[in-house]
Image (spheres, grey):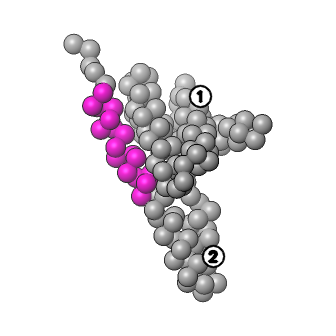
Amino acid sequence: MRYFLLFFYCFFATGCFALLLRVPRRFLLWCSLTGAFGYLVFLISEITLSEPVFSYFLATLLIELASEILARRLKTLSTLFVTTALIPLVPGLGLYRTMYSLVQNDLSVAASEGASTMIAILAMAAALAVGPFLVKLFWRKKA
């Protein structure tokens, strides 16, 4: 039941963010589904994998691959789906804790939180770089 609620919340949040970015209405459902499934993959992989970095990488890679495939099928840009679908995955709490620790002058906690947040962001960036390469490698154009 918990995962269903989290899926629904991410679906709703991604859809609202897509509305905020003025995504055309015909793509709203796809943006919301991509974000919700990406977060669901993140939650499941966070339980099964030992490091959260792999969870960020795997979920972002799924979002990137789904966005590339949807963009080719719906004849639009993949950026439309990626920018909205990554919203549930952004490590905002880690950034907040880093800044809060800096304000409180607790430098050891700030360094620890900042390092783990930056590693998560780098894992997401790596997945965003690998995704288009994989799609181009395996997607065959019609002759």
Q: Position of residue 26 (x, y in %)?
A: 55, 24
Dominant SS of magenta comes to: helix
Q: Position of residue 20 (x, y in %)?
A: 59, 44
Instruction: Tell me the amino acid under the disc marked 1.
Output: Leu
In reply to whether residue 129 is colored magenta, the answer given is yes
24 or 60, nearer to the observer: 60
User: In the picture provided, is 102 more to the left or to the right than 74?
Assistant: right
Which residues fall within the magenta stretch?
Answer: 122-138
Q: Residue furthest top?
A: 143
Q: How many marks?
A: 2
Real-space Cα separation, disc 1 to disc 2, in angstroms: 36 Å
The residue lying at 39 percent from left, 46 percent from top is 128
Quarter the C terminus occupies: top left
Determine crowd level at label 1: few under 14, some 14-19, many 20+ residues with C-alpha closer than 10 A.
some
Position of residue 139 relative to residue 46, above or below, is: above
Instruction: Tell me the amino acid under the disc marked 2.
Output: Tyr
In reply to whether residue 125 is colored magenta, the answer given is yes
Residue 122, visible in the rendered structure: yes
The residue lying at 46 percent from left, 32 percent from top is 66
Element under label 2?
Answer: helix
Q: Which residue is mark 2?
A: 100
Position of residue 105 relative to residue 1, above or below, is: below
Q: Which residue is mark 1?
A: 29
81 or 41, nearer to the observer: 41
